[in-house]
Amino acid sequence: MLRFIKQILGFSTKQPDKPSTRESPDLLPSSTLRASTPLEPTRSTLLKDGEEEKSTDAYFKIMGVMQEAVSKRDYAHAARLARENLKYIPAFVRSTRQSFGSFDTSSVPALEVGGTMLALVGDDEGIAEMRRVVTSNQELELWIANLEQHEKDRKLFTAILEAVQQNPGCRQTDMKLLVGSEDGRRVSTLISWLEKAGKITREKQGKTYSIWLAGSLHSPAPVPKHNVRSHRIDRNSPRLHEVDVARIPYIPLPRSPLRWEEMQVRGASTDLPQTTHHFDVRDANEWEIETIEKIPPEEKPDTAFRQLHPLDSGLLMVDDLGKAEGLGQIPAAVIRYDRSGQLLAKKPLLHDTYRINVNPMGRGLIAMSKDCVVHAYDDALESILETTLRDTPEIRSIQKRFDIREDQMKNHIRCIALSPNSRRYLFTVVDEAWCVGIDGDAFWGIRLPIKDGWTRFSEPSETVGTSKDIQQALLFMGLCYPFTPENIKNRYRQMAKEWHPDLNQGDPTATERMKTLNSAMQLLTGISENALPAYTGVHYAREVSRSENKVGDVKFTMTTSYVVGEIHAADWIYAASFAGWSDAVFLVGYSGRVVAVTESGEPIRVYDIGAVPRRIVDTGDYLYILTDTRLYVLRDETLHTIIDTYDGGDLIVAQTGFGLLEKKRFRWFCEDGTYLGSILAKDPIRRIYAAPGGITIETRTHRGFVRGAPAWWEEHAL
């Protein structure tokens, strides 16, 4: 089997360097090809390899089904699968070690979330079997800590249920004492698992929860869920245009470092200023701390509202976890303040906020829930949109294009945005963006081009093999003679789903197994790469290594390429925003390309920063692009300045300028990036807003007024 894999993959005996993971989105693994120098197999070795491969095949198959069961909250089934998978782990370890020289897999789901499932359902025999598997295999010693945690969790699950039975309505904050544990965070995590498993129910009580056994007389009724339909009035999508970067102005910008600690940047300093005072002013002679007061208990900010979003009309703060006080059992909540910091509204949202976007030049917010329901609100926090994306023709099309599971759909919809006038909204899925009217009429669709370095793989296949190689390929795919093309096609699709890298994040063998599977398909079907898409979908290749070799007088070049499906080579859209005072849009791909699009869906310009922005804001005059380490300030094709953000600061944009809010520092700038001054805080900053003649800044316990700081809004603009 090893000879077969080596032959069809073209492995050399020299292991190439691992390429950077920077090129891949968080859902997509990096391309890693590794090779060892196997001995020439004998017949008995081939049989053993086949048996190992069958066990390894079973391991990956069961693992994929187990993880799907966990995502569907079928925990009893997931626990049975986890226990079943334990018997295949030793073979998986041996196969990996034999193929690659060592077992350096960083994740074994059956020993991780699988162990939690066993503890949750109370399978003591399963946990005991896990101990036998882990302690009898030296390569699994890293999972001993996981095993010990599962054994503790088994006892804690029981203790929590007994405590709730004996103390119905007990508070979650008291549970640590009731079960005799010092790890309150772990207890809270297990309570969450029990709630998702339907064994307990929780009811919001102030800053904590009251806990009841599910189905008990006094347990709170579950929050009713209502079905949300699509508001789309069109059954077909508008025409989808692919961006042609070569046909529009291209503006390359200085590359943004991924993280400062990973870069040796000359002259860069990550030593942030600090203060021992509650508040302090730096670099602004005309600013002064006029007053500092301790915030009265009744005025202390609710820490549940941890997201801050300035608007044209004031300030929004979002409770994304549904922990706000006084609102009961809610998925999420929002507080709105006016420009002077006065509370105007505090309301629960209709759904959770898995994705959220607030346009600082607009007057509302838009969010998407975990079940892909888009909900939007106006300036008074009244609902203006509630629609599901699952039934849209665009989602159905891309789901078919990439074979995306229903429970994974939310991970592929990366962005939502609301126009400043609240008449349009935008959503992105993988590499596509769609603009839709608030009334349900779609306007345009755009697809970003494939990431640089990838080319469509369409060369004729040269994969051939002996009858023994064919037999090994059948064994690899769990097939035997006789077989039909339909057998091959169906088996490939099944294995591709089970071994999809999205289901095996952290497993370095997953991508290689998919590559081996693709090569086996070519060997068994005999079709060229031009015809293979009919079976497997479009594929793309990228060269990862090249070497010049010479045998006698003959010189030749050996290259190693990484072949992937289209979803891996696609430039996923990771940030999107409407322009400040129009329906134009900015789309940002994982490649770091920022595409400006007109309100009619026509690409007109592309900026290239080489990194994924966390936020992009257009005010109509200036464009601000914020990455983890840098803020770019642009106007059309002109770069006005670059500002480094060492503390992962957030961008706060107002009419007269912008600020960078870091954990304990707020820096204020003119619109063009001219630095005006800073305010430091001894404790983390919770809220900051404009006040007559200056700025008010708050931590959890203190409030300070800084006189002389510039106004955030034009006085005549409301």
Image (cartoon, grey):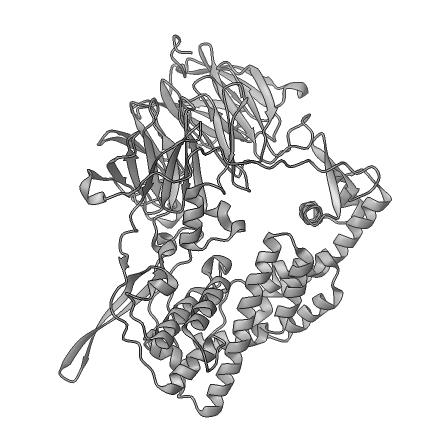
Q: Residue 687's x, y, as percent?
A: 52, 24
* Left or right side of 417 for 149: right
Kindly identify the residue that appears in the image at 65 percent across and 55 percent down: 74
Q: Residue at x 55, y 42 (%)?
A: 371
Residue 613 appears in the figure: no
The percent coordinates of residue 108 (x first, y second) are 56, 64
Q: Is 568 displayed left or right of 298 in the figure?
A: left
x and y percentages locating residue 643 in the rendered image: 33, 33
Answer yes or no: is residue 351 visible: yes
Q: Quadrant of the N terminus?
A: bottom left
Q: Is residue 210 above or below residue 196?
A: above
- Please state if 374 lies on the left or on the right of 603 as rendered: right
Number of dots carrying numbers: 0
- Residue with the most extreme left position: 553
Quadrant occupied by the C terminus: top left
Q: Who is closer to the viewer here, 580 or 179?
A: 580
Q: Residue furthest top?
A: 716
As displayed, is residue 253 above or below residue 664?
below
Residue 552 on image: x %, y %? 16, 85
The single residue placed furthest to the bottom in the displayed view is 43
- In which quarter of the view is residue 403 placed? bottom left
Kindly indicate the quadrant of the structure image that contains residue 417.
Answer: top left
Relative height, residue 645 to residue 581 (above, below):
below
